[in-house]
Amino acid sequence: MRAETLKGHLDFLLLAIVADDPAHGYRIIEELKRRSAGTFDLPEGTVYPALHRLEQSGVLASSWAAGSGRRRRVYRLTARGRRALAGARREWRGFTEAVEAVVT
Amino acid sequence: MSDRYLAELEAELGAVGIRGSLRRRILAETADHLRESGDAAAFGEPSLIAGRFADELATSGARRVAFTAFLALAPAGLAYAVLLGLIRTWPDIASARLLPLAIATAVTIVLAPQVAFAAGVLTVARAWRLRSQTAAPAAEIVVLRRRAAVALGSGAAAFAGIGTYAYLYASGLPGWWPPAALIVSGAALVPIGGAAVALARNAQLRPQATGPAGDLFDDLAPLVDRFPLPLRGRPWRFCLLVAVAVAAAAFIAGGPDEGPRNAVAEFVAVSAAFAVLGRFLGLRR
């Protein structure tokens, strides 16, 4: 999938992945690829600016976590992020249902 | 491979104004990622990643600074109006301790809050317009930062002005007014200063995204496009309308004695401000 197409939905996808379990950047990217069966494959480094921006806007929080001899930045959803994700899910379902109704 | 990539990324981050603890954190996260993936090429070109960081963080940061500035200025402006409104009889300007300073102060306490209000509203209007953008064009962010800087600077000047006014006319004002003016000024300058610090931090980022800066008519599109007269692309017509509206308000507020003089002064001030600051603040192209 073209990166431009994905860009408008990246925030929603990242919040959805982190909602299940706090995760570090590499795991988030791997999960994005795995769940989309490789469809969402963008330059891996471009996910980090989005994670930082989402943290800056208060929907994600992060902290250093030590494990297997290394420090990793782990991202988790905030209460505000949960509300934002719930709203985005509602909006997405409404949108896809409307598109389905038109094209099928 | 990884070390060379990190060195390149470090340089590129520096080139877009990302330094200090933020850069260290980005490099630590990148190093951790590359240890796991072992594929620097899949991570993306260092210049692309650095540019993306600058674009996204500058956009969301500038937007937040804009709302913070407005929240700092709005209650301060209200307190300012109440404070000046409580002066029943204004001291004669010639009774000041230092007349040239008194004239400069009088001009400041009249004009600075108006500039702060106009710039503050325009700052929020642009921030609102950019609310759904993750990486706005650099030119848009520059205008947003300038508006916030002018709003905060004018707000600070207004409060410095009433502090000076309290000193110059201490004997001609009610006894409680000078200390109240100093307390209110001090209290207002704290959040204004905080917003200014946040703005200065954001201004260190150098976003790379290309695109036009937009103008007043883009920011105020919902109002401008509903107005009975065509205004889009006619900045001086817009300026004339605003100047007439402000002059009319000054005429009514000033009454028969001071109204005509105040109206002319306001008309000239609004037109002059538009001429001087118009391009700088993205009011006209």
Image (cartoon, coloured by chain):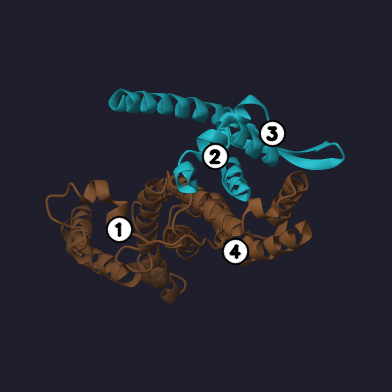
Chain colours: A cyan, B brown
- Relative depth, front residue between B156 and A47: A47
Label 2 or label 1, whichever lies nearer to me, is 2
The mark that comes first in sequence, 2 or 3, is 3
Q: Position of residue B280 (x, y in %)?
A: 38, 68
Q: Secondary structure at mark 1?
A: helix
| Residue A23's disc number | 3
Label 2 or label 3, whichever lies nearer to me, is 2
Check whether the beta carbons of the residues at disc 4 and disc 1 lie within 8 A of each other: no
Quadrant containing the N terminus of chain B in the rendered view: bottom right
Q: Secondary structure at mark 4?
A: loop
- On the rendered structure, is B20 left or right of B65? right
Spatial CA span between label 1 and label 3: 43 Å
Q: What residue appears at the point 42 percent right and 75 percent down from the top-left corner?
A: B99
Q: How many marks?
A: 4
The chain identifier of the residue carrying mark 3 reads A
Q: Amino acid at mark 1?
A: Leu
Spatial CA span between label 2 and label 4: 28 Å
Name the residue that disc number 1 marks: B216
Q: Are marks 2 and 4 on the same chain?
A: no
Check whether the beta carbons of the residues at disc 2 and disc 4 lie within 8 A of each other: no
Spatial CA span between label 2 and label 1: 38 Å
Name the residue that disc number 2 marks: A40
Spatial CA span between label 4 and label 1: 28 Å
Name the residue that disc number 4 marks: B16
The chain identifier of the residue carrying mark 2 reads A
Q: Amino acid at mark 3?
A: Ala
Q: Secondary structure at mark 2?
A: loop
Q: Amino acid at mark 2?
A: Phe
Q: Position of residue A87 (x, y in %)?
A: 46, 27
